[in-house]
Amino acid sequence: MTPTCPTCDAAVPMPTGVVAHELITCPDCGTELEVLTLSPFTLDLAPEVEEDWGE
Amino acid sequence: MMRVGLLITHVRPEEKLLLAEFAACGIAPDVILDRDLAFDLTAGPEQLSPSGLPWAAYDVILERCVSTSRGTYALAILNAWGVRTINTYQTATTCGDKLLTTLALARAGIAQPRAMAAFTEESSVQVIEQMGYPAVLKPVTGSWGRLLARVNDRDAAESVLEHRFTLGDWTQHTVYAQEFVEKTGGRDIRAFVIGDRTICAIYRTSPHWITNTAKGGVASNCPVTPELNDLCVRAAQAVGGGVLALDVFESERGLSVNEVNHTMEFRNSSAPTGINIAGAVVSYVMSVGANPLTPQPPLHIGEGARLQAVR
């Protein structure tokens, strides 16, 4: 079942080969989302970028 | 079966590539989210990790956190317990701080841009004027080219410093100033070192003075010359070694090391170089996991590491 965006409620198709905790973008509203689980697919808002994030 | 933990904040394209390479080697690492970490600091590695396994059961933990603070402290704890990690706490804490990186490179005699440190607005202006304009001000911690400031004159220097000391937290009150290096051809080099070898490098070209690919720099292949390899491997060892990405300047004075990154991103680098960077990282992880007495063994990339089909 296609999950829905927690921000705009649009259906968010899952990319092929998606893995848990991957970040994706809602095609309707552009919100960055995190794939929490794969079976079933569940989504939440991606964590906000923090000051110490980097490589 | 080797037990590998992959410690992450979330899955970036790099972690997805790493998971695929682990799978190709028949290994399914336990993905451990840094948001789930909870350590009893007064106990030891027999306590359970979020995966349900004791930390002591892992042959090696590959730390790939986007969160520098979470990753660095997790490494401190795990290394204190004798759990092997890539990279080590020593490497992460050195690379995570530009001032400490400069000190480590200087101690090893590695060519690098001149850099100075000061702790007040007044003394910071003095060190900038000692180096001359333009100069580059960088937060000692930070990444992706954020909050870098090129100051071309005293007015700009005083303005940036006043903002940092008025609006910034205490981490902004250690001023790290670096001489501005005019890059040959508007580009710099990002070189990838794994163990004792520079496996590949890219040029990052941009009309902007900040060439990070996160800021729009364009990647193209950079041949790894013996000179580049030697400089990068020595620099990598100077900061503790492991899996590292080095930013290198080319200028009239030759090559110099600008920064060293310890949880490198490489999504844009395998295609132009033709090198399977994720595969090389996984090979290194497996060699460390298989050799408990040699935590940072040399890695020799054979032809097998070349991409058959560029992703």
Image: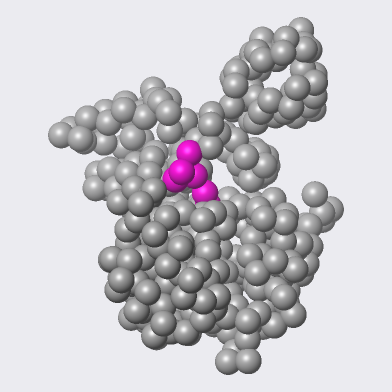
Q: Is residue B32 left or right of residue B46?
A: right
Magenta stretch: dominant secondary structure: loop
Q: Position of residue B271 (x, y in %)?
A: 78, 57
* Residue most extreme to the left: B42
- Outermost residue on the bottom side: it is B253
Q: Number of labelled discs? A: 0
Residue A48 x, y percent position in the rendering: 53, 31
- The question of residue B201 being in magenta is answered with no
Q: Is residue A50 above or below residue A45?
A: below
Q: Which residues are magenta?
A: A50-55
Q: What residue do we see at 39% from left, 59% from top?
A: B162
Q: Residue at x 58, y 92 (%)?
A: B253
Choose between A2 and A48: the one closer to the eye.
A48
Q: Is B302 in front, or is B181?
A: B181
Query: Image quadrant of residue B310?
Result: bottom right
Specify the color scheme: one colour
Residue located at (38% from left, 44% from top) = B69
Please say whether residue B17 is visible from this viewpoint: yes
Q: Position of residue B72 (x, y in %)?
A: 36, 47
- The image shows residue A32 at horizontal and vertical percentages of 66, 28
Q: Nearer the viewer, residue B233 or B13?
A: B13
Q: Is residue A19 visible?
A: no
**Compared with residue B260, is residue B129 higher up or lower down, i.e. above or below?**
below
Q: Which residue, as the protein is rendered here, is positioned at the far right? A: B309
Is B201 placed above or below B66 here? below
- The residue depicted at 40 percent of the width and 62 percent of the height is B161
Viewer-proximal residue, B59 or B48?
A: B48
Is B236 left, or right, of B211 in this rendering? left
Horizontally, residue B254 falls left or right of residue B86, namely right
**Residue at far front of view:** B155
